[in-house]
Image (spheres, rainbow, N blue to C red):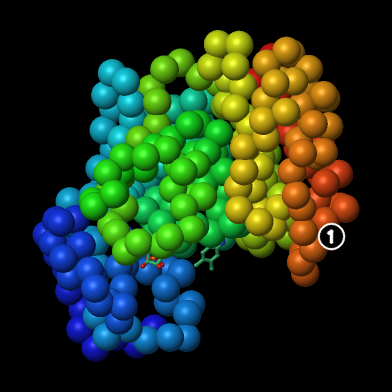
């Protein structure tokens, strides 16, 4: 990635002002994914000094600043102990510690990467995103929004109520993208289930959630496999993913119901 100017704004508002109306400017989180791109940018707007490197435990929520790294999700007690370790579990096998020390929550969510384990887990958790211009909205709505307005993702907010979480993914070899990933989160009798890397973007599985809420783990797996769309790519066929989905969702639901 070649850049002509490298800027470090001191706040998300300053960062937004730098990118607004300038298609040649790119926000930089960890920069790990941007670096893989062949295109260059006139201006790189690095968020490393914008005050977004925080984890705040509040009575109602855990607020995760956009510049929090995957490694911090694994090591900071506030994140590591959250919801049965779901945040730490979903990122813990991604590449290696060096990469997880760099890549950020904000870069992952804002990048809308369909393969991203973290996005699937956040969807199951019922997370909201906070955007500098767009304000707070459910992650589900943010991911569905096709109008890609340039904005700065400030933080992700996950509910702090007692929850049980389970993570499942299947990779062909260690450090590869998942063939499929799935998360289940229980709050009382309700279970939220998200499935990603289908290879399309993460989606909630509503029929599966109804079956899980009735205590039927294998029914939830079958329902998720039936209701979601799957596709072919170099990692797996749609038919294989559908079968894997049934198994991974059933295992995740069994774990949160146990
Ligand atoms: C080699 C490699 C292997 C990987 N393997 C996996 C894997 O197996 N599973 C998996 O789930 N993930 C994987 N990832 C993805 C990784 O975990 C991150 O999702 C990815 O690197 C993006 O995070 P980043 O901080 O590097 O973002 P960047 O590269 O900095 O940015 C990504 C995009 O988001 C924009 N952006 C960054 N921050 C913000 C913000 N705060 N607000 C608005 N826009 C923003 C940037 O402009 C850019 O368009 C892999 C990444 C790498 C480099």
Task: Identify the residue at image location x=74%, y=13%.
Answer: 215
Ligand 1: quadrant of the figure = bottom left
Residue 178 relative to residue 40: left or right = right
Classify 10 Å Cα crowding around label 1: few (below 14), some (14-19), many (20 and above): some
Residue 60 lies in what quarter of the image?
A: top left
Q: Taking the image as drawn, is residue 75 in sight? A: no
The picture places residue 136, in percent across and down from the top left corner, at 31, 40
Task: Identify the residue at image location x=37%, y=53%.
Answer: 106
Task: Identify the residue at image location x=27%, y=85%.
Answer: 42
Give the quadrant of the C terminus: top right
Between 100 and 240, the one lying in front of the other is 240
Image height of 38 relative to 216, above or below: below
Between 124 and 78, the one lying in front of the other is 124
Between 237 and 73, the one lying in front of the other is 237
Give the quadrant of the N terminus: bottom left
**Residue position marked by numbered label 1 in the rendering:** 237
Image height of 114 relative to 56, above or below: below
Residue 250 lies in what quarter of the image?
A: top right
Number of marks in the image?
1
């Amino acid at each position: 990635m070649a850049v002509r100017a490298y800027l470090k704004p001191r706040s998300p508002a300053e960062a937004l002002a730098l990118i607004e109306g300038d298609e040649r400017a790119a926000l930089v989180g960890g920069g790990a994914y941007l670096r893989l791109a062949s295109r260059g940018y006139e201006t790189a707007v690095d968020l490393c000094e914008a005050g977004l490197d925080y984890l705040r435990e509040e009575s109602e929520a855990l607020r995760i600043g956009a510049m929090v790294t995957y490694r911090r999700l694994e090591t900071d007690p506030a994140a590591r102990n959250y919801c049965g370790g779901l945040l730490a579990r979903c990122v813990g096998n991604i590449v290696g510690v060096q990469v997880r020390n760099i890549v950020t929550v904000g870069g992952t969510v804002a990048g809308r990467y369909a393969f991203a384990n973290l996005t699937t887990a956040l969807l199951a958790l019922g997370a909201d995103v906070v955007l500098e211009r767009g304000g707070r909205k459910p992650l589900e709505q943010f991911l569905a929004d096709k109008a890609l307005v340039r904005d700065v993702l400030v933080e992700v907010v996950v509910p702090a109520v007692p929850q049980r979480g389970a993570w499942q993914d299947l990779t062909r070899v260690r450090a590869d993208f998942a063939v499929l990933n799935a998360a289940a989160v229980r709050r009382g009798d309700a279970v939220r289930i998200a499935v990603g890397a289908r290879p399309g973007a993460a989606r909630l599985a509503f029929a599966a959630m109804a079956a899980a809420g009735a205590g039927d783990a294998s029914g939830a797996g079958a329902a998720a496999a039936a209701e979601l769309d799957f596709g072919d790519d170099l990692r797996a066929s749609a038919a294989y993913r559908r079968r894997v989905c049934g198994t991974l969702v059933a295992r995740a639901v069994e774990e949160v119901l146990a």
